[in-house]
Image (cartoon, rainbow, N blue to C red):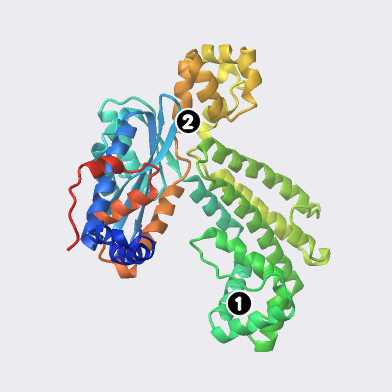
Amino acid sequence: MKPFTDGDFIKECIMVVIDSLCPEKRSAFESVSLSPRTVCCHIEEMSDSVNDSLKTCCSNFDAFSLALDESTDMKDTAQLAIFIRGVTAALQVYEEFLQLVPLHGTTTGQDIFSAMLQCVKQHSLDLSRLVSVTTDCAPAMTGEKKGAASLLVRHCKAAGHTQLIHKVHCIIHQESLCSKSANLTDVMSVVVKVVNSILSRSLNHRQFQALTDEVNTHYGDLLYFCDVRWLSHGAMLSCVCNLQQEIATFLRQKNLPGADHFSNLQWLARLALLTDITTHLNDLSVKLQDKNILVTAMYSHITAFEVKLPLWEAQLAAGQFMHFPCIAACASDDVDLNTCVAVVTSLREEFASRFTGVRPLAPGFKLFTSPFDFPVDEAPAPLQMELVELQCNDELKAKYHTTSPLSFFRDLVLPSNKFPNNTEHVKRIVAMFGSTYCCEQLFSKIKYTKSRVRSQLSDRHLNDILLLSTSSIDPDIESLLHGKQHQPSH
């Protein structure tokens, strides 16, 4: 991800080392070319090697899903990120970056569909094995008539593919949308203004740091809030809540707006409520972002949080704050229980109205995660007889709780060759993307790679760099070297 011109600098460093360690080899190393053009060619060749290996890998998938998301780079070019998650016959799961497709014109559903279909053809993917398409649920992605995912589903049906293809809305995105319902606007607006008034002026910032140093506070500074990055919401509120006395003192000394709020105990109690709620939501968001997490685990985290919400409602209504430490630190007379309950109720209702794309899949998830507890009569007909055999197998039942569901089916069920239909069901479940978080991570790399000082980076080279930095597949260096002819540096 470094500039191609770094090759010259690296060569200078290598030559310094060679002069110190083995000066007699200087001429051999000096003839090695690391010019920008040479580095560029090597990156192209390594990218082509990874692409060839990726196509071979994709051809072995028995089931796969796609994750799509679109963003703009610093030159206002729309970039469509496409990831694939596939499962082989041996229940090995691979999640790989397929391609970054530039969209130089419009970004309608038809444009995205055409770009996605071209990528599918380039990688020779068999759409009869497609399980799901996960997006951020923008209209251009999931519109019922002209959305890219809907167009892909209709294309598969027209091609004679009969499998059910699920359109999944990113679970992390939905959780973030739910979190906005718990935002106490009057509190949050004051906090943002106060933090900005301190951090945006260098003198104020230095004086506030001096104040916190003077009182030896554990939190030495405030943090900015970024609406795009949800986790910064909780980090900022935690800092403000823990530094509320220092902030109140500083605002009074500098005669800045907001001092009255930080002296109002009822307002501080609302700040404590917002901080506690946001902390719980942040904990959920972090769990959903675990590496290689399956969609079943993501859904279980969501359902667990939904179970907690009615419990919190009842406890807050009774004035019990054991799960809300910031509110517990406030005087009981300052806490408005009705507001506390209303915030949690709003959050519960918002969660209940979302995740409509994955809720119908819950029985299939449970069949994968708890096959020995699943009612046989509720299982799909092709799986029922196998499920009876599986549940009556005491040897497998004894080993089930010693490993993860995927490892159980891969290492114990699959080798027996007795449960082919259940195995096919497992392939479809573990192949699904639960979120487009991989796409968001890629967009962060794009921001770093195609920066202000590298704005002229071509679409081809941007894709090559991202493929090499993101893919778990290594280029076949040995094959590349065998096909090379030595060309000395001039």
> Residue 455: horizontal and vertical position, in percent?
29, 66
Q: Compared with residue 465, is residue 473 higher up or lower down, i.e. above or below? A: above
> Residue 407 sits in which quadrant?
top right
Three-letter amino acid code of the residue under disc 1 = Val
Closer to viewer: mark 2 or mark 1 = 2
* Residue 262: x %, y % from top left: 70, 76
Instruction: Decide: is 66 above or below 380.
Output: below
Q: In this view, does 227 lie above or below 107?
A: below
Residue at 63%, 85% in the rendered image:
207
**Circle 1 residue:** 194
Contact flag, marks 2 and 1 (Cβ < 8 Å): no
Spatial distance from mark 2 to mark 1, Cα to Cα?
47 Å
First of labels 2, 1 by sequence position: 1
Q: Position of residue 420 (x, y in %)?
A: 46, 16
Q: Residues within 10 Å of mark 1 (few under 14, many from 20)?
A: many
Which of the 4 quarters of the picture holds residue 489? bottom left
What number of labels is visible? 2
- Image point 60% across, 54% down: which residue? 282
- Label 2 amino acid? Ile
User: In the rendered image, which residue does mark 2 sit on?
Assistant: 429
- Quadrant in which the C terminus is drawn: bottom left
Horizontal side of 415 relative to 263 (left or right) equals left
What secondary structure is found at the residue carrying circle 2?
A: helix
- Which residue appears at 54% of the width and 83% of the height? 201
Residue 240 visible, this angle? yes
* Left or right of 349, for residue 150: left
